[in-house]
Image: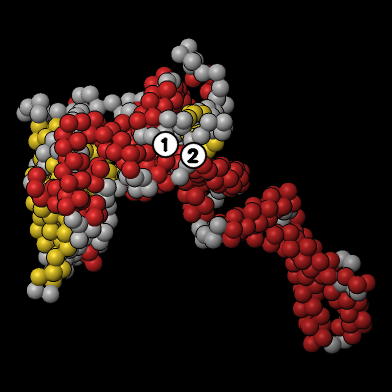
Amino acid sequence: MLLRLLIRNFALIGELELTVGPGLTVITGETGAGKSILLDAIGLLLGDYADPASFRDSTLRCVVEMEFLSHDPEVLALWSQINNEEPHSANFEFILRREISPQRRSRCLINDRVSTLKELKNLATLLLDLSGQEEAVAVDKRQTQVLLLDQIACCEDIRREYAASFTEWVQTRQALDGFLTEYEKSQREEDLNRFHYEELRSAPLENWARLIDCENQLSIQENALDSREKLTIAAASLVGDAPNGGQAIADQLRDLLQQLAGISGKDSEVAAWTESLKSVLLQIRELARDAESMAEARVPDLQMTQQLRDQVDVLQSLLHKHRLFELQDLRDLREKLASFLETGQGVDERRKTLEAQEARALEQCRLAALRLHLVRTKGLSDLSNRLAVKLAKLSMEHARLVLDWNTIVSNLNEQSTADALQEWVPTEALMGLDRPDLLFSANPGQDPRPLGQVASGGEKSRLLLALKSLVKEQGRDHTRIFDEIDTGISGETALRMGQMLSEMAKNQQIILITHLPQIAALGDHHWHVTKEVENQQTRTALSVLGLDQRQETLARMIGGDRYGKAALQQALVLLHTSHLSQ
């Protein structure tokens, strides 16, 4: 239950502090006086955006503080979770405070302990239910309907359990999808790396310390073959068949000696020169024999030469492909690829683990959705009958509201298991298996149709109140705030709505902004909001009205600022009637 409200430096409010009592508190005031400013300020505790432009004084902090007394087990459990300590009593006081600086820095406190905005919002949401005008307009929206229906079915905890399991499944699914994406990428990389590794493994990297060594050995083999060929040609040129059909050098010398044989006996000098020529011929024959010997000694291994040539080509190609310079760099790369491929062998195990985790999370999510569906359908099995009673009290005796579950998987019951949901994949955290529609008919003889198609604004307001009135408040001390839920109604219907609100206020605290005197007269407490101008400054003021002031305010609501005795008398009758009805 809300005990105290403090608002400082917000919109037209300089500072406002109110003590709030139990039961029904009504707030009245002219349009534009600032009634909705109160709700906007309270919205800050519920996590609404704080715009410094709405500060009364842009140089000062804006402060909103609310003090609650609660014995709600869910509230106490959340407090224990936030603070890691148990409340010191069954009825525990909570002071929720939010401060916003001109620099838009937000500071949140729960019982003078700094907290996060999320923690403040979660706790405030359990203590406070704010129904703005937009909720009555949105009552035909499925999301609004689901939230209301879950409150009526008392399954909000189960819905939160489903939402948590859905979030856990989504996270595991995202982890698996991310892993599989990387896995496919790594598989492509692994195939390429395996190809490179096999190419390096089959290369003759261990045969040579350096590429130059292999190239030198190939050069030796290639030089041997070239030397043999040239030495053979040289020997033939000296004493054999000279290339190209020419005469060998030894044959030419013999012919020369024969030509000189006739004069060598007559000329001693020629004879000496001839002897020297004979010596040259002997040397040529010796050189030819040496050349033949060397040629015979130089027998190249043609197979080895080809092997060496292939090895040089392979090693040069690998160095060029990988942009490396030494064979040791290729050996290091081979070892690195081998290590990478060995590491990749554990990828399959990781994939299997993630797939198993995702399957378990999906099963738990499906089971949570099944529990939520069963509790919903059981808790709302007689919703139409219960709601018909409430609507009759709001002058809608002939109205019918039919709940169509539109469950995605049919024929579910208490014996159903996760196997019945094998084909269902969760898509969001609120609905679960259900896509409920509220079908409405206001008049006899008309078939129920979707609420948004047939319900007027006043009918939506009454439907919202009727649904809210079905929410069980036993064991809870919720504060409900309604902003002009009586929009679009008047007369006897307005009186009946006020009586329903008054009845609800016996079990819970209700704060209601209203423009209708019939409803305002039913309040246990009456606040009146006015707009005042002082020193050229406009401000919103709030007064807690006594009995005489209430009569005057109601008379003004009935007859305007120039109300007469008749309006005063009617206001007195309203107050007297409301007192008797209570």
Q: Do the residues labelled 2 and 1 touch (CB within 8 Å)?
A: yes
Q: Quadrant of residue 240?
A: bottom right
Residue 110 position in % (x across, y down)? 13, 43
Q: Is residue 483 left or right of residue 371?
A: left
Left or right position of 232 against 11: right
Q: Residue at x 14, y 28 (%)?
A: 71
Question: Is the residue 134 above or below the residue 254 in the image?
Answer: above
Q: Label 1 belongs to which residue?
A: 145
Q: Which amino acid does label 1 sit on?
A: Gln
307 vs 372, left or right, is right
Q: Name the residue under label 2.
A: 451
In terms of image quadrants, where is residue 154? top left
The x, y position of residue 412, in whole percent, is 51, 18
Could one spot residue 83 in this view of the protein? no
Q: Earlier in the sequence, mark 2 or mark 1?
A: 1
The residue carrying pointer 1 sits among few (fewer than 14), some (14 to 19) or many (20 or more) residues within 10 Å by Cα, namely: some
**Along the line of sight, the residue nearer the viewer: 146 or 161:** 146
Using the image as rendered, state which of residue 557 and residue 240 is in the foreground: 557
Residue ID at (79%, 87%): 269
